[in-house]
Amino acid sequence: MEALLVWPEFPPTYWSYSYSLRLVGKRCLLPPLPLITVAAMLPDSWKLRLVDLNAERLSDEQIRGADVVLISGMLAQRKSMHQLVERCRALGVRCAVGGPYATAVPEDFAAADHVFVGEAEGSIGEFCRLLERGRAPHRFDGCDKPPITDSPVPRYDLLDVRHYLHMALQYSRGCPFSCEFCDIIVMYGRKPRVKTPEQVQRELDAIARTGFRGSVFFVDDNFIGNKKEVRALIPHLQSWQEANDWPFFFYTEASLNLADDEPLMKSMVEAGFESVFIGIESPSADSIAEMHKVQNMKGDITGRVHRIIEHGMDVWAGFIIGFDSDTPSIFDEQYDLIEQAAIPFAMVGVLQALPGTALTRRLEKEGRLKPHIGTDQFGYVNFETVLPEKTLVAGYRRLLRKIYDPRAYLDRVRAMLARRPQPRWRARPTAGQIVSGIRALITQGLIAHYRFEYLRFLWKVWRWDSSRLVEALMRAGAGHHFIEYTRKVVAPRLEAMLDARPLPALGGSSRGRVVCPDESP
């Protein structure tokens, strides 16, 4: 059989880094790890082709040339997934959909020939045999939370790694906590399942064989969900890095209780972890209690963030507004926390009730759900909020403008670098990275509307410690997307909502603008 694996398009978001990707000459932030993982489980006799719609176009000829089109995606890729199903139907080619969205809402895919519900390990072989015989059912249920020690090395060889700024690898699935809004625990459970250290090393070997060098994202929704196992893994990561002359540096997602484990932070930095994304969500104790985020209740949030930074990792953080406990002061409280904690990369979104979550069940019981699934954090909320919606939108617009004012952002970068020790090692820059740095200097220092703030920032860093200029340039380059996307896309969209005008588009095609998974632990 010939199988065409298609990764749907993401809409542009803060996660997409589209403006910053242009500075470095890349099309996407991350590769389609779910699809290349599935590809490794397909029969050896099958001929495979992978198309990432965020990096390239898909022709009708490619679809017609396949016996089956395999589509996987998240809720954020909803629109593109349905368009792909319709294209396959119009061209008379069988299609099968799977992944988090199809698993959460399989009834949305009545138009697809087949819907694979659940995780692929342990059951996709039977599904493939049924496909080959023409006997596969419309809905096929995979194994419930299979051990991922059965998961093979993803097919990184199917990728054109030149398209991607970073590579991706998964160590664990699941999270031990019970945040009310989170769908990760619904899909993957509260008992984190992990791969063996040997599996992870084999996957790092596979990435290295592609010729890629640079940043590798451990896509786990909570990398430290099983602390005992992750402590056993990290020495293997460090030994692999040392044996391979440190080709990668790592980043991941983790819960805030990482700050309470000094040996774990120290070992992560020694293995090459340079940054971590943390779901902080809110400075409000009432809102944290409402969402059942117990891991954020212990101690001072700002102090805990500072501890992580002072151990040598940047902190990227997620924040949410729209909880029942939020008051009109929440927008200023969020801003104050972000500034005081020195978090340059603050992903602020409006709360959405996702399918299957405890939040959705509660709101449904209270009669507050609106009759659509919300996937657009810059659109209308999909439930009746306690704060008036106009107050929510106006406060959100003001908060984003303040956070991504160029001076405010760059000042937070300086404040973070002042706390963060200088990395003890750094791979020698490639020719491409040097060219990207020159491009960023020209774009941000000579062309951008905030060029004077940018040059002021570099001057201050140089006067403080000229050896930190490369770090400053990298973080300023990442911030280019946040600054421009807020100014050109998000602020006008929120203004249109306040004026009750039709919402402007989020920025057209997202080709070359892949986002990270949109959950925060």
Image (spheres, rainbow, N blue to C red):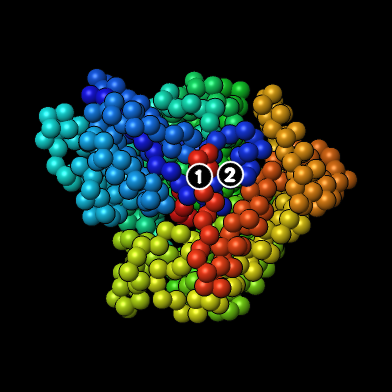
Residue 18, numbered label: 2
Seen from the viewer's position, the closer of residues 118 and 110 is 110
Is there a contact, CB below 8 Å, between mark 1 and mark 2?
yes
Above-or-below relation of 109 to 332: above
For badge 1, the amino acid type reads Ser
Q: In which quarter of the image is the N terminus?
A: top left
Seen from the viewer's position, the closer of residues 431 and 423 is 431
- Does residue 142 appear left or right of residue 496 in this picture? left
Q: Identify the residue at horizontal 38%, vertical 46% (top origin).
A: 80
Residue 22 at x, y = what percent?
63, 38
- How far apart marks 1 and 2 lie (CA) works out to 8 Å
* Mark 1 crowd level (few <14, some 14–19, many ≥20, 10 Å Cα): many
Residue 48 at x, y = what percent?
32, 25
Query: Sequence-wise, which precedes: disc 1 or disc 2?
Result: 2
Disc 1 designates what residue?
Answer: 510
Q: What element carries label 2?
A: helix
Q: Quadrant of residue 18?
A: top right
Q: Identify the residue at horizontal 51%, vertical 63% (top origin).
A: 503
Q: In which quarter of the image is residue 307?
A: bottom right
Residue 12 visible from this viewpoint: yes
